[in-house]
Image (tube, grey):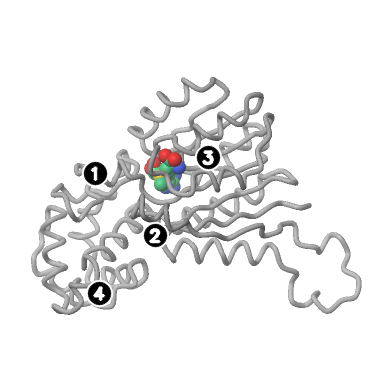
Amino acid sequence: MHNTVLLEEAVKYLNLNKNSIVVDCTLGYGGHSSLILKNIKDGFLYAFDQDKIAIENANEKLKKIGNNYEIIHTNFENLKKEMNKRKTPNAVLFDLGVSSPQLDNAERGFSFHKDAPLDMRMDTSQSLSAYDVVNGYPYEKLIEIFYKYGEEKYASSIAKNIIKNRPVKTTLELAEIIKESVPEKYRRKGHPARKVFQAIRIEVNNELGVFEKALNDALDIISVGGRICVITFHSLEDRICKHIFKEVSTLPKELSGMPIIPDKYLPKYKVIASLTPTKEEIEENYRARSARLRVIERVR
Ligand SMILES: C[S@@+](CC[C@H](N)C(=O)[O-])C[C@H]1O[C@@H](n2cnc3c(N)ncnc32)[C@H](O)[C@@H]1O
């Protein structure tokens, strides 16, 4: 897709050759997967997504390139379970968050610019939706998620106003309540609903918990010499990635002063890169402004 962020860079860092076995954990509309498939003529691509509509679209694209791929319609929290039944990958990609088509499709309820029922489920067969969070969660729990997942400093006044206005049925109703809950001055710094919408989306899809598990699983299943590329779109995801990469690529403190370190204690992974999009990419695609790509390699 034209506006896929860090497309070439991420694929370049996967270090593919024509026989590579690749997992794309976030197929989306198949931008990365198309490019991957073009690079692995005799290899194989496994692509995960929990969004049925995205899969249908991506499949149309991929089948024009080759047939050496399998789409796995499930949450990537099942990565290990699914990959245990398949070939060992030498490259894994995560391009986290919602896709541009998900954001642009008003009905999905992700956007605070377009009126729609409060939904935000990436997997539309899941039961918990944004409506349940906004209208069902107690005051303290709303504050907690707005703080934790949105880093929203007006969490408590927003939560109070949501409760006063229940039931809140649509995205624009919610956006208006949020706007009314923050001081005039704060409204000028980007849209005041952005952080709370992000927080609700993370909660609905359990995005951080699922990512942490899946990233640890990817580290476990990847072959020696293989690489994992992660593209994140906000600091909460990036922090998880940075922390896990650091932990698995450094010597435990107790060993760092030892003159000779037995092989079995040496870190199994090496951090390869951490980069942000170019100015041109940000100009072309506003979503890119907060993106970051991190790359790690399994060395033993
Ligand atoms: C940013 S988009 C990926 C875009 C894709 N790289 C491309 O080039 O078109 C993220 C995709 O990952 C999917 N996704 C996010 N979290 C997921 C999860 N936990 N399990 C499975 N799919 C997930 C979303 O449904 C969305 O389609």
* C-alpha gap between disc 4 and disc 2: 25 Å
Camera-nearest label, 3 or 4: 3
**Residue most extreme to the front:** 280
Residue at left offset 22%, top offset 48%: 109
* C-alpha gap between disc 1 and disc 3: 23 Å
Q: Residues within 10 Å of mark 1 (few under 14, many from 20)?
A: many
Could you tell me residue 88's position as x and y percent? 68, 37
Please state which amino acid type lies under the numbered disc 3: Asp
Mark 3 Cβ inside 8 Å of ligand 1? yes
Q: Is residue 10 left or right of residue 198?
A: right
* Vertical arrangement, residue 245 with respect to residue 227, above or below: below
Mark 2 Cβ inside 8 Å of ligand 1? no
SS at badge 3: strand
Task: Name the N-terminal-most of marks 3 and 2.
Answer: 3
Camera-nearest label, 1 or 2: 2
Residue 198 is drawn in which quadrant?
bottom left
Could you tell me residue 28's position as x and y percent? 41, 39
Task: Name the N-terminal-most of marks 4 and 1.
Answer: 1
SS at badge 2: helix
Please state which amino acid type lies under the numbered disc 4: Ala
* C-alpha gap between disc 3 and disc 2: 22 Å
Label of residue 289 in the image? 2
Q: Residues within 10 Å of mark 4 (few under 14, many from 20)?
A: many
Cβ atoms at labels 4 and 1 below 8 Å apart: no
Residue at left offset 22%, top offset 54%: 132
Quadrant containing the N terminus is top left
Label of residue 24 in the image? 3
Label of residue 155 in the image? 4
